[in-house]
Image (cartoon, rainbow, N blue to C red):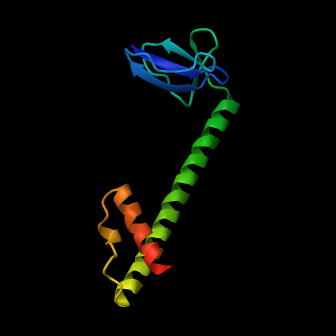
Amino acid sequence: MPRCLFERATGLYVEGLMNADVTHDPATHIQLTFPDYPDRRIERWDGVGGLRAATAQELADFDDVARDKRAAANLDMALNKALRDLLLDIEQRLRAAGQTSTLPDIAAATNKPEYTTALKTVVKSYL
């Protein structure tokens, strides 16, 4: 049976683990065991030991937060793409000018540290 962690102040389900305790601060969270994981959007801890249906305001608040997270993620993706496109353009200009000896291939970077290092190198070369 899952052990479910709830915020004491809001009754909002945070996370759960099957047959294992969730590390938490007992002052701000409570862990309870239920037959199944609660639905984060429509169920809340009732303040005693069970679950209750979320109020209309809680549903609206939950949906607003979810919408804001999606918008922020979309913005992050758009900004990352714009930055990558700009830096690829800078890289191409430097290569065209013959400054290719220390330039990494940004497009070939396969992980975040490699990508970050490549971007820093290109920016330093351009400045």
Q: Position of residue 34 (x, y in %)?
A: 46, 13
Left or right placement of residue 65 versus residue 119 in this view: right
Q: Position of residue 60 (x, y in %)?
A: 66, 37
Q: Position of residue 84 (x, y in %)?
A: 44, 69
Quick one: which residue is furthest to the top in this view? Answer: 48
On-image quarter of the N terminus:
top left
**Residue at the image position 31 percent from the left and 72 percent from the top:** 105
38 and 27: which one is in front?
A: 27
Q: Position of residue 5 (x, y in %)?
A: 52, 20
Left or right placement of residue 58 versus residue 118 in this view: right
Number of marks present in the image shown: 0
**Residue at the image position 63 percent from the left and 33 percent from the top:** 59
113 and 29: which one is in front?
A: 113
Quick one: which residue is furthest to the right in this view? Answer: 57
Question: Is 26 drawn above or below residue 82 in the view shown?
Answer: above
104 and 21: which one is in front?
A: 104
**Residue at the image position 55 percent from the left and 59 percent from the top:** 75
Question: Is 83 drawn above or below residue 14 in the view shown?
Answer: below
**Residue at the image position 58 percent from the left and 16 percent from the top:** 26
